[in-house]
Image (spheres, helix red, strand yellow):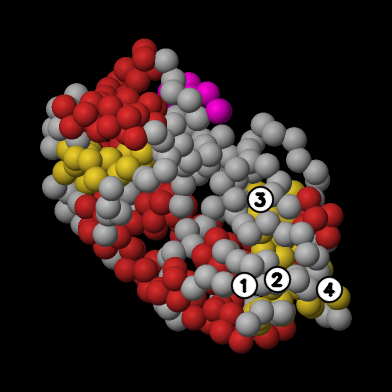
């Protein structure tokens, strides 16, 4: 659908209060760039968050947390922390829509689903059945600001010094993650492999056993989060950047960063969720096509041999790497950048 011609103030979007602002921040940025945007029924400081998001107020969105529990929402009291509800006002009409940013495939707020005319689901699985008003949306990284995105584009032509990079949290299936690291560690070439353990995701004995296995094959293990600027620099300097599905088999937030940077992306398996414009294996990323169960448990041992068969030929094919980098950057520019996401939201809502 082609959007009508309008000035920024012609379309007004009002958002409800949410206790998890960073999970809606990418969409707030998207909407604030193409519409008049405000937040209702919230503390005074909360109303400035959309503007601050656009103006790169990193610390505020990352650190502010309301201390007074769930408030009474302007449309309904029963709303998931991960679902934002909005009203679009245009030509005297009001259209209600919700954005569900949770990593799970399930609709997180039946209340918001019933209330809305359109329900956007960030991790809408391709083969699951949903009500007709549920439509997909990109899983936007809520910690990215306009400044970050502009800087990430500058990394697109960074010289490559490392063959394979995999820096990943160990969660969403510890055994699967450990096997990925072990297989990558066995490959030739210059590698940067760092496993980040998250407190509370497994028993201490399971964590210790996993660390021993990883350290035995040369994988660096840590409990500290990796500095984001250093992470981006190392991604940019790597020929191949390996990622896996998020905690609940979602497309991880980091995908936005990689697409914006124009990285050559390698995944362990195809993604269960689908975005409005599908990310295609072989075009926007290369998949080892490991058949991993949807319950986040590990694939069979033999499946991990596919990583070697996928990665080594790609390392030798510089032309293919460059094509994948071009395709991933083009995907971001055409479908995943905030302005494009905002226009997609408006196009879907105005159809209703």
| Residue 60 vs residue 185, the one in the foreground | 60
x 72%, y 59%: residue: 79
> Helix or strand or loop: what does disc 2 sit on?
loop
Label 2: which residue? 71
> Helix or strand or loop: what does disc 1 sit on?
loop
| Stretch of the chain drawn in magenta | 289-295
The kind of secondary structure the magenta stretch mainly shows is loop
Instruction: Report the Cα–Cα distance between label 4 and label 1.
Output: 30 Å
Label 4: which residue? 94
Q: Is residue 280 above or below residue 15?
A: above
Q: Is residue 174 magenta?
A: no
Q: Position of residue 174 (x, y in %)?
A: 39, 31
Q: Is residue 173 above or below residue 83?
A: above
- Residue depth check, mark 1 versus mark 2: number of the one nearer the observer: 1
Residue 68: numbered disc: 1
Q: Are marks 1 and 2 in contact (CB under 8 Å)?
A: yes
């Amino acid at each position: 659908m082609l959007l009508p011609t309008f000035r920024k103030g012609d379309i007004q979007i009002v958002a409800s209060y949410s206790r998890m602002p960073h999970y809606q921040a990418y969409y707030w940025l998207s909407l604030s760039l193409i519409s008049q945007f405000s937040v209702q029924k919230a503390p005074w400081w909360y109303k400035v968050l959309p503007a601050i998001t656009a103006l790169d107020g990193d610390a505020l969105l990352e650190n502010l947390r309301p201390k007074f529990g769930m408030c009474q929402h302007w449309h309904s009291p029963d709303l998931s922390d991960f679902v934002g509800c909005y009203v679009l006002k245009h030509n005297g009409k009001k259209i209600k829509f919700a954005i569900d940013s949770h990593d799970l495939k399930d609709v997180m707020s039946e209340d918001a689903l019933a209330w809305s005319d359109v329900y956007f689901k960030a991790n809408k699985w391709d083969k699951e059945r949903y009500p007709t008003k549920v439509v997909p949306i990109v899983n936007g990284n809520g910690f990215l600001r306009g400044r970050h995105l502009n800087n990430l584009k500058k990394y697109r032509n960074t010289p490559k010094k490392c063959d394979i990079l995999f820096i990943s949290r160990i969660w969403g299936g510890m055994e699967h993650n450990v096997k990925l690291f072990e297989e990558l560690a066995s490959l030739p070439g210059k590698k940067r492999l760092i496993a980040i353990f998250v407190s509370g995701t497994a028993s201490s004995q399971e964590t210790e056993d996993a660390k021993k296995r990883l350290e035995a094959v040369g994988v660096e293990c840590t409990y500290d989060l990796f500095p984001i600027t250093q992470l981006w620099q190392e991604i940019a300097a790597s020929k191949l950047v390996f990622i896996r599905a998020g905690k609940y088999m979602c497309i991880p937030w980091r995908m936005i960063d990689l697409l914006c940077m124009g990285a050559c992306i390698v995944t362990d398996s195809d993604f269960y969720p689908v975005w409005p414009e599908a990310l295609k294996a072989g075009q926007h990323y290369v998949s080892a096509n490991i058949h991993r169960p949807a319950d986040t448990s590990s694939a069979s041992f033999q499946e991990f041999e596919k990583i070697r068969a996928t990665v080594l030929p790609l390392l030798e094919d510089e032309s293919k790497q460059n094509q994948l980098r071009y395709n991933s950057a083009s995907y971001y520019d055409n479908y995943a950048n905030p302005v494009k996401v905002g226009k997609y939201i408006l196009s879907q809502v105005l159809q209703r």
